[in-house]
Image (cartoon, rainbow, N blue to C red):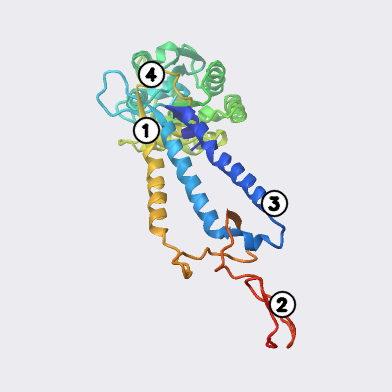
Amino acid sequence: MIDVLANLDWRAPWWGLLALQPLLFWALARRRRQRLAGYADAHLLPWAVTAAPRERGAARRAAANGLAWLLLAAAAGPRLPLETAPGQDAPATRHHAISVMVLLDVSASMAATDIAPSRLTRARLELSDWLARLTGERVGLIVYAGAAGVLLPLTDDPALLRRALEQADADLIEQVGTHLGAALDLASRQLQGATTRGKAILLVSDGEADSLAGPTGEAARAAVAKLAKQDIPLFILGVGSATGAAIPLPEGGYAERDGAQVQSRLDAAAYAALAHLSGGRYAGVADGDADWVELHDHGLATLPGDPPAPGQARAWHELYPWLLAPALLLLLSGFAGKSGRVTPKDESGGQTPPLEKGSRGDLATLTVMQPWVKSPPTPHFQRGEQKLLPDGTTRSDGHA
C-alpha cells in the first residue's frame, strides 16, 4: 500500500481544490444559523423559525459531501505508472524503480554437479529467468570468491545484465575461498550511491557450509547486521543440495582435504538465518518458478519503489473507476431513500409547516405566522370576568 501511494499520480490535480467546496458551504450554513438565532428572542424562536431535523439533515449532508469528494477525486484522474520493456508485446506492468545488487558466487564449489548441469551454470540460468520479471528495477552484478569485484554497475538495461551474466566465471577472481563478507560490504557501498529509495541485495550462492565458519563467517554476519541497520534486505537463492557433491578441479580430479575427497554441502538453515536477520527471504533453487515467487513476487517486488520521472511513463493504470463506483452507490441510495413528507392541510388548502417546538436541530427557513398556526395557550379567566379572544376582542358572558 505504501508503494502504491508513493507511485500515485494525478492527471488534473487542480480539481482537488474544489474539494474545499463542502467546507465553504459549511461555513455559510454556520453563519446562516447564527443569523437566524438572532432573529428573535430565545423563547420565541420555536414559533418563528422552522427547525429541520438534525439527523436527517446531517445524513444527507454527509452523503452529499462524500459524493462530491468522490466525483472530484475521480475528475483529478488518479493513476499509477505502467511500463513495458522495449520490444515486448506483453501488457504494460507497474513501474518498480528500486536498486538491486546481485552477488554471484563463483568460488570453486560452484562447479559441483549436484545441481545440473552445474551450480554456476544453473545460477546464471536462474538469473536470466529472473530478468523477465523486472519492471524498472536497476540491477548491478558483483562476482566473488576469495575476493569480490564489480562486474556491472547499477543499470536499468536488462540486455547489459544478460551479457554480464554470460561473462561471469570462476576465472574472474583469482583468490580462492568464499569471502561473503567482502562481497556484502562492496554491495553496500555500491547501493549508497543509488538514488532510489528502495534498495536490496540478491545473493546467489551454493551456501557452502564452510563459508560461514571462522573469521570469514564472522565477517559475513557482521556485514549482514550492517545491512539491517541500513534497511537493506538480503534475499538469498540457494543453489546446492544437502547431500552435497565433490568439487571438480580445473586440472582434473576432485578437491581433497587430508587425503579425503571434499563434499560441498548446502547449509540452508545458516543462510536462511542471514536473510531473516536483514529482513529478507531465502529460497532454494526449484525446477519451476516457486523460488522466484518467494524471492521476487513476495520479496523484491513488495519493496517501495520510486515513481518514474514526469514524461517517462509509457502507460498508465487509471484508478478513477474505483471512485465512480461508490459515488454511483451514494447517488442511488439518495434516490432510494428520498420520500415525500406528509403534513396536515389548513382550511385554505395549503400545508401546515412542520413546526417542532423545542427542537434543537439546525435552524432552517423563516415561517410567517398564519391564522391557522396554533397560538400559545391563552390565559384562563374565572366566571364573570372578561376573557381575551383570539381575534383580539373581549367578552364577559360569564362563561369560562
Q: Amino acid at mark 1?
A: Glu
Measure the C-alpha gap from mark 1 to mark 4: 57 Å
Q: Nearer the viewer, residue 138 or 165?
A: 138
Q: Amino acid at mark 3?
A: Gly
Measure the C-alpha gap from mark 2 to mark 4: 120 Å
Q: Where residue 375 sits: x, y (%)? A: 63, 70
Residue 169 visible in this rendered orientation of the protein: yes
Q: Residues within 10 Å of mark 3 (few under 14, many from 20)?
A: few
Q: Nearer the viewer, residue 133 or 21?
A: 21
Measure the C-alpha gap from mark 2 to mark 1: 71 Å
Q: Where residue 296 sits: x, y (%)? A: 41, 32
Q: Amino acid at mark 2?
A: Pro
Above or below, comparing residue 222 to residue 43 in the picture: above
Residue annotated with mark 2: 379
Badge 2 or badge 3: first in the primary sequence: 3
Q: Residues within 10 Å of mark 1 (few under 14, many from 20)?
A: some
Q: Nearer the viewer, residue 58 or 5?
A: 58
The residue mark sitting in front, 4 or 3, is 3
Measure the C-alpha gap from mark 2 to mark 3: 28 Å
Q: Where residue 342 sits: x, y (%)? A: 45, 66
Residue 208 visible in this rendered orientation of the protein: no
Residue annotated with mark 3: 38
Residue annotated with mark 1: 318
Q: Residues within 10 Å of mark 2 (few under 14, many from 20)?
A: few
Residue 157 in the figure: left or right of residue 198: left
Q: Which numbered disc covers residue 249?
A: 4
